Structure formats: structure tokens, C-alpha cells
Amino acid sequence: MKYNFKEIEPKWQRKWEEAGAFCAEDFSDKPKYYNLVEFPYPSGAGMHVGHIKAYSGLEVVSRKRRMQGYNVLFPIGFDAYGLPTENYAIKTGLHPRVVTDRNIEKFTSQLKRVGFSFDWSRVVDTTEEDYYRWTQWIFLKMFEKGLVFRDNALVNYCPSCKVVLSNEDSQGGKCDICHSDIVQKSKTVWYLRITEYADKLLQGLEDVDYLPNVKQQQVNWIGKSTGAFVNFSLKEIGETLRIYTTRPDTLFGVTFMVIAPEHPIIEANRDRIKNIDALDAYKEECAKKTEFERTQLVKEKTGVCIDGLTAINPVSGKEIPIYISDYVMMGYGTGAIMAVPAHDERDWAFAKKFGIDIIEVIKGGDIATGAYTGDGEMVNSEFLNGFTNKKDSIARMLEHLEEKGIGEKGVQYKMKDWAFNRQRYWGEPIPIVHCPHCGIVPVPYSELPLKLPTVQNFEPGEGGESPLAKIEAYVNCKCPKCGKDAKRETDTMPQWAGSSWYFLRYIDPKNSEAFADREKLNYWLPVDWYNGGMEHVTRHMIYSRFWHKFLYDLGEVPCAEPYAKRTAQGLILGPDGDKMSKSKGNVVDPNDVVDIYGADVLRTYVLFMGDYASAAPWNESSMKGCKRFLERIADLMDLVKGEGVTPKLETAFHKTVKKVSLDIEDLKFNTAIAAMMTLLNDIADVGSITRDELMTLVRLLCPFAPHLSEELWEMLGGEGLCSLAPWPIWDENKTVESTVEVAVQVNGKVRGTVSLPLNCPKDDAIAAAKADSKVAALIEGKTVIKEISIPNKIINIVVK
RNA sequence: GCGGGUAUGGCGGAAUUGGCAGACGCGCUAGAUUCAGGUUCUAGUGGGGGCAACUUCGUGAAGGUUCAAGUCCUUUUACCCGCACCA
């Protein structure tokens, strides 16, 4: 048969749509299966082939599940709020709404052309009022429960995008959107108290089936550490300076303290500090350094001793100096540390530079040449002397601290609270009113959605204020509590707000009474399988687990973890081996590929090109192999003879059905396709195939190349849609031949093969091996030391 | 520095988990078809040696365990990813 994809692909896409073939049913006798892929951000550039690979994995799984008789939910939507659209809109003068609608349209047509089996009746768009109404609703619920707060603090600020960024959005000191350097700025912003869920987020990982590196990255990001808070008293003012340490047992080795340059104790004691000018100068110098410079200067420690404040070591009673230095961060622990130069590399380097005493408290190293960070016997530590076990000495010290009331056990997380606002237009309005009389007042639930006003000018202000601040009709309002004049919050929510709960809305996308019906949530949750990119593991994945856990605690969802299983696909690199990007000009547009090769070839190729989880460069000539494969499948129509089973192909078929079925479950699509190619080669050798056999092959192929499969299925007289036909099953007994070729080794080297019946007894196998003329010649006149026979695999005869 | 990972032909990648290394595809070589390009078909394709049956070496490097190692153990090198002065 001539393979005319241009005709058959639109034909079957139309038929699937007419039949509603991929619409999930709410409630069904069939078992449910919820597959989720990360919904795209509809950028102006359209999709690239990386999106296609990302969706093709669970597309195959979804299609297989339907054929296996599951009620499958495989939805798609658009995460459409965000800066790129807004920046594009500013540049072109078009409204973000117009740009967004246009981009969504483009993405939709691209996705449909590839023939993905999404349930198009459940599309969500995070920028629609019906959707962000519930984003705001969840925000207000969090506000109600004390998880939303406002604080003046040092924040990550992107000077180019003119927005405050969360810690997650500024990884590596770079803006996640434009990659400029982040600066630290003191600002009053909204936070979500995600740290309150740190422990739950950590513990929940034990109950889910995530890829090990996905779990590990989340564990590292949460960064739990256990230790102690210790209060050092300050000689001059009688107040205390509080520190956090993971090694309270080294307290006797503390010879100085270090605080962050921004530590409030400096401001509080300006008058008392004699060298305040030097401290101010140092602080200013630090603020100027970029994150990059700070990390590049790791070896060289800098700092200034505070003249006028002295601390007292709470266990030894000794007076010790206090320094400011940028190696202590305000954002972790208390912004102050006790320095133990003998056993901490940074403290050691600092002490050497400033000529501070180094007291050994753990034996085992040479503190003259460097800090000793290993284990050993405690010395110079009064009641801890003689302890050799870290755990015991820490426990003993904690006991002592609590007895004396100078410290207590503590836990710290590297994860910080989520800076939850952007000073930009294209986002969900934060439903809060600032009232001069009542303070911060939430917008009543009945007034949701708080609509984003439609305006012409939405450029951000130079000073980092939101464009909404300029719209008086929006800003000025009445306080919902007292009714007097008040002002609206003008910041919007960050990009990640809408995506934190989208998987819940798919379950009931049109509900106007609730974010989703509880019965439907009970039926569909949790997501059975979630596949996405590694880059979202410490952003979206953490955020959405947090929101879900919050809703669970509220009693709104039936399970504590949203995603039962999470896998990740590897990137598609450009033909040059670099990451695909518009600026490098190496982006491949799926539409171009579909035009030339067809959707089925594209789908097959992105899965065949390599291990699904690894990055692989785009290689057009390699794609031709997939084209030939599908053409040869189509040509099988001309080889169909009779019904039933071709004896010479029976084992090959059962083997292939098994291999394809199992490989799909492990995301090993490349070997699943290779197995079908091998079967095709076997069929070509035989020269004919029965109608039943081709119908089996076509069903195996259907998740990968559904259009061609449907066409062949129809020509073969298959009933209904191939996409909904039963998945083939294999007979384990028929996956192996009755006779097997077994390699014969002499002294570990292969010298021949013998044909043996399946599961041949050892003695018979050895005898057959020895009967082989070449083997016989090699063992002639030698002593046989050992004879090994692994059934159906190998025979080894060891001689001397 | 800490954490995770990878290394196999000219290329992308297989290898039932210790059992014939290189499946499958690309590319390449030769031949057939074709005016030619493209397509398709047949045969071959890890390196060295041989007309050949065959032989020898071979999974980043060096050791080891084993009848048998890409796979397990020890040492080591290179690269990739994540976090990073986290107290």
C-alpha cells in the first residue's frame, strides 16, 4: 500500500474527534487511570519538538491503557500568565490577552496535528476568569490559615524584568526568565509560608514513586538540618546574640563570632559601635558584589571586627570578638554563627587571616595546617572530654544547654518562604485590600474573581511598582470590612500560582461552585503518572505538592500526595548538539517535520532517537529510518495471505507483544520500536503474513503511529477504532522456541554452538557439546576440570 | 566543596541484570534498478592478521573476584547535571 500520510492523518484526527474517542468519563465501571503531562506555556515562538517528546511518552502510555480497558484521563491546558507574553505585548503594542489567545490557538493546532489523544473537552487556561477565580480562592484560604504574610526583607530582585523573584526562581543567582544577575533589595513583599510544610514535603516523598534523582533534588532543596540554637550574651548591653549550629558539641572551641553584614544588631547599636563607618563601608561593598563574585571569592575571607560589642562564650565564660563577614548569610539560620576555627574550614581560613586563636576540641587532625572536620576524641571541653561519638557528645551538650537555659535543639531548612508576588500586569490579581483603619483585609469570597482590569498601558514602573498601581479605578475601593476608602493590593501572583493546582481543575473544568466536585476528585485522584522536565523538580513540583497538601489539610482533596508516580524526559538538543534555543537558531518546528514526514514519523522518531530520559541531538537523517519503517509496515498490506498463525512467525509475535508491552511501562520506547522493526524483518524473511497477525502488529503500533494503524485496521476489516481495540496479549510459553541455540565455550571462549531442546538436562547438553567436532578437537587429550551448563544459555567446558 | 549521573563501533544507542558485546536505526562500501538526483532492493560493515575455514585484540584507564565481567569489588581519569561560604 502506498503510505499517504497527508491524506490519512487529517482523516483519522477528524474521526477521533467525531467519536469523542479520547474523552474521559467521570465515573465508570472501568478502572481509572490519570496520566498528566506538564501543560505548556504558550509562547509566541510556538512549540518545538522538545514539547512533542515530552508529551509523547505518556501519550503512548495513555493509548495503551485505553486499549487495555482503562478509563483514561489525559488532559492538556495552558499555563498562560507570565512575563514573556507581557514583554512581547509591550514590545508589539498588542494586549497580552490578544497575544495569549493567539498563542494558545497556535499551540492547539500544533498539538492536534501531531494527533495526541488529549481530552480536548477539558482544556484549562490559567488566565480565564473561571480558572483564576479558584487560584484566588486557594490564596484566600491560605490567608485565612495564616500561611500568607507580608514582610520587609532582603529579596531577590531582577533589575531587567523589574520584579521580585522567589528563591526557586533565582537559582544560581540568575533570573529564571531573562538570566540577568539578581540583586538583593530590601522590599515589603508577600510570602507564602511554604517552610511550614517543609517536613510534610520531605516525609511525603517516602510514599511516592518518583525517579530517585527527582526525590534527591527535592530532599536537597528542602535541605533539612538538625542542630541547636545557642544564645551568646553580649558583655556591653546584656542582650543575647542567637546563633544556629549543627555542632553544639564544639562550643568550647568557639573563639569568635561572625554575623551577616545586614544583621539588625548593628543598626540597633550604632551609637555604641566605635567603628561604625568601617562597618557601613564593608556592608556597602558586599551589596555591590554580584552573586557570581561572592562565590568566586570563596577562598579569600573578608570581614571587619566590631569595635564596641563583645560576646561571652556561654560554656567557657571567655570573652570573644564579633566580626561581620559576607560568608554568613542573613537568610539562613539566625544570620549569626559561632566560629570554631579548629573544625570548620571557613572559620579556620577566617581565623588565620585575622590572627584569632584556634582551640582544638576534637583530636585527630593537625589544626596548624587546616581545620579537622572528621570524628575523634573530645578534648579541652570539660564535661565532654573523652567522648568519641559525635551523636553522644551533641546529646550531652544539648542537655547542658537546656539545663542552663542558654540554648535548645533546633531544625533548619535551606528552603525559604515563597516570595509570592510580581510587580507586573499579566498575572492573577492578589485579592487583598489595604485599609487605613482595618489594615490588611481579604477580598470576600463572594467577590471572586477579582478581575484583572483591561488597560492599554501596562508597562512596569521604574521603581519596581506594579502597573496596576497607576490605574486609579482599580486601586481605589471600599474596605470590605468597614466600608471606608481603601486601596487594593496592586501586585500580581507569580507565574507558578496557576500551575500549582491545574491537575485538580482538569477533573472538573467547568465547575462554577467549587474548584472541582468532591466526588470527582475522589474518583480521579491521585494522578497515577506524571511526566515532566527535570527543571521543574525544585519549582513547580515543590509548589504544587505544597498547595495540594494545604488543600488536603483543609479537607478539600482526598489524598496527601498529588502525584503517585513521577518520571522525566530528556531534552532534545539541536542538530549541533547544543540546547535548542531561539537565539542559537537551532530550533526544530514540529510543523515543518509533519509537513515533510507526517505526524506518525515524528512521533515514532522522538521516541526512537534514544533513551527517553536522556538528552539526544536531533538528527534528520536518522528520522528517515522511521519513515522507512512505517512505509514497510504499510507495504505489509500486499503480503497478507489467509488467517490465523504463520508457524514460522508465532514465537516472534509473542516475543514482540511481550517486549512492546513491558517496555512501554518502563518508558523504553526505543527498544519497543526496535522490537517491532525486528519483527518486520522476520516477516520480510518469511514473505507473507496473515490478516490476524497484521492486525496484532497494527495494534502494537497504534500508540506510536496511530494514524497509519487506524488506516490499516480499517482496511483489514477491524471493528471500530483501532485506538479502542483490545491490546494484544502474549502467551509466555510461546515466547520461546522449542529448540535453542546454545553457545559452547572451552575455557571461557566461544568455540561453537549446538542446537538443543528447550530446558535440556545438563548431561545431555554437555554430551551434545562434546560431540561438536571443533569442541571435541579442543578437549582431545586434555583433562576436563569442570563442566558448566546454564540451561538455554551457555555451556562451558574447562580443561587443562 | 557536597549530592546525583554518564563513559560501549564513524553516529544515536542495545545487551533478558554475571552467560555468544555491538540488537534496532543512521551512516558507509559494493552490486542491481534509474538519463540523472532521490527512492527502492541485495550483500557487507568493531580493530588487526588471513584467499578462506579461521585467528587474535576489543565496552574511558589500571588492578582484582569468577568456569565466565560492559555488568560485581578496589584504585583512577574525563565529562554532564543539581546545590553551593547552609554554619
Image: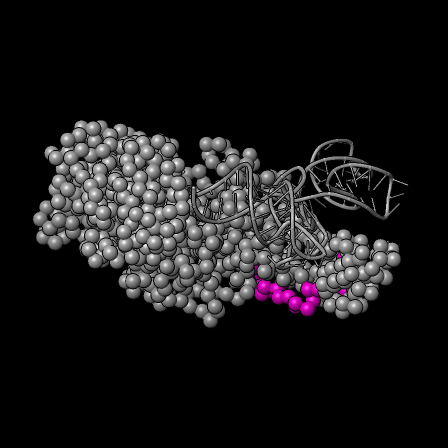
- The picture places residue A235, in percent across and down from the top left corner, at 15, 42
The type of colouring in the image is one colour
Residue A720 falls inside the magenta stretch:
yes
- The picture places residue A81, in percent across and down from the top left corner, at 34, 44
- The picture places residue A570, in percent across and down from the top left corner, at 51, 46
Query: Is residue A6 among what the camera can see?
Result: no
Total number of numbered labels?
0
Query: Would you place residue A757 above or below residue A111 in this image?
Result: below
Give whichever of A473, B52 is nearer the camera.
B52
On the image, which quarter does residue A518 sit in?
bottom left
Task: Tell me which residue sits at (79%, 68%) in the image.
Answer: A763
Task: Tell me which residue sits at (46%, 51%) in the image.
Answer: A213
The residue stretch that appears in magenta: A718-744
On the image, which quarter does residue A717 sit in?
bottom right
Query: Would you place residue A683 above or below residue A628 in this image?
Result: below
Query: Would you place residue A552 above or below residue A150 in this image?
Result: below
Query: Is residue A702 among what the camera can see?
Result: yes
- The picture places residue A621, in percent across and down from the top left corner, at 63, 39
Q: Give the left or right position of residue A465, taking residue A719 as reference.
A: left
On the image, which quarter does residue A474 sit in?
top left
Residue A739 falls inside the magenta stretch:
yes
Query: Would you place residue A268 above or below residue A543 in this image?
Result: above
Task: Tell me which residue sits at (59%, 45%) in the image.
Answer: A609
Give whichever of A570, A267 is nearer the camera.
A267
Give whichever of A613, A741 is nearer the camera.
A741
Task: Tell me which residue sits at (45%, 48%) in the image.
Answer: A533
Image quarter where the C terminus of chain A lies is bottom right
